[in-house]
Amino acid sequence: MTNPEREGPRTKIAVAAPEFGRIWGGIGTYLGQLLPGIAPRHDVTILCGQTPSSDTGYRTVPLANGGGMMANYYRFQRALQRRWPDLVREYRPDLLVVHHAQMPDLWTDSTSCPTVVTTHTTILGQARGIQSAVRHGGPLDDSERTTLAVLPALLPIELYYWNRVRHVLFVSNAVRHEVVGTYDPRLRTSALITNGLALDELRAAGGTSDSSEEPGFILYTGRLLGWKGLAVLLRAMVHLRRPERLVVTGSGRVDAWRRYARSLGLGPDRVEFLGAIPRSELLSRLRRATMVALPSFMESCPYSLIEAMAFEKPVVATAIPGTVDMVEDGVSALLVPPGDAKALAEAIDRLLGDEAMRRRLGRTAGAVAQERFSSARMCAETLRYFEDVLAAS
């Protein structure tokens, strides 16, 4: 592969992404930041689940779509297995890039070119997070219930998958430690490259930075999943000394979560569920929020945290491996034990009652985001790793 900074032949990169143009979660956000950094310099083909609803500016090849998340991933795996020989003949990729825990290339004989597995999480890690959510109550998403139901079958498949993998890009030290410690894969190359965002564009999309915050406006962003710890956050709202307002954004079982909040005595004056909202509105809400809560049981390198840091928002997060690699307790965020609603409430109360602390934590977090979590850094490091993989193959 040529140096991306000088002229030369364009490397052909195939990206297998079943959720591209369909479900814009963490992997969708990741691709939205990575692709603009590699597509202008290289020949990129996106193998996606369905034809995107709007022009993405990239060459897309829809393979399979339908059903829930698990069913959609399975259909994509089988479609890629069937279509891969034809895709190789037509596009002649030099490199295949996939994402775990989706395992889109599970049944594909991709020996025609090296494969980089960008690892955001593992099935085992997700299951542990869901099991923690079960112990602490609250609704579960259909995908979470399905994961637990078929877990005995999924874990041997994940082990089989890791026995095949040779090149891995880990998005966090937490997920690298989990994979290496649990599966001990026989890797030829690996890299640790944390997620990044186009920080200046992000802040500009959120509106002017000098608008006043809304007092008592606590923000939660992310899908409404049990392992995200939303039930713990809602219970923490009950313990707050200040009757402040929580705004919850994200797709999921909104009605079920509203009912759960009401069962705790939290009406719409205390908790506002917005569901999935346009990105521009989300960023506007983030800019105006007093603080952000990230109560997850499991994370790798969460974009919701990077976004809050970029806007210099004070954050209360759980002290789990994925977040402690990104922020420092009392310096760039406040960290509490996962699942501890009272500790979470106490930390939120501390921030709400101390404007100087909010500003100090926010400014420090913003500086950390600028130094460590830019998309320019992520794209440059990723392209260098792709070079290493091709050189080793």
Image (tube, helix red, strand yellow):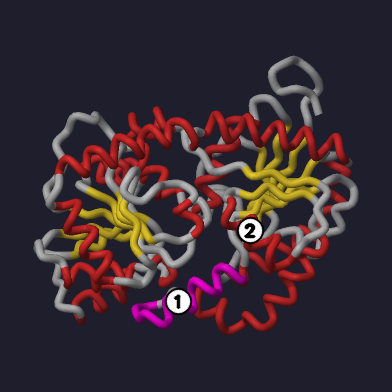
**Residue range (magenta):** 124-139
Instruction: Identify the disc placed on residue 132.
Output: 1
The image shows residue 241, relative to residue 290, as above or below, that is: below
Report the magenta stretch's main SS. helix
Q: Which residue is drawn at the image coordinates 79% and 18% (left, top)?
A: 8
Q: Which residue is drawn at the image coordinates 33% and 68% (left, top)?
A: 230
Location of residue 375 in the rendering, given as x and y in whole percent from the top left corner = 52, 34
Amino acid at pointer 1: Ser
Magenta segment includes 363:
no
Q: In whole angstroms, how far apart are the C-alphas of marks 2 and 1?
A: 20 Å
**Residue bearing mark 2:** 177
The crowd level at tag 1 (other Cα within 10 Å; few <14, some 14-19, many 20+) is some
Location of residue 39 in the rendering, given as x and y in whole percent from the top left corner = 65, 31
Q: Nearer the viewer, residue 25 or 160?
A: 160
Q: Which residue is drawn at the image coordinates 11% and 48% (left, top)?
A: 215
Amino acid at pointer 2: His
Location of residue 207 in the rendering, given as x and y in whole percent from the top left corner = 26, 32
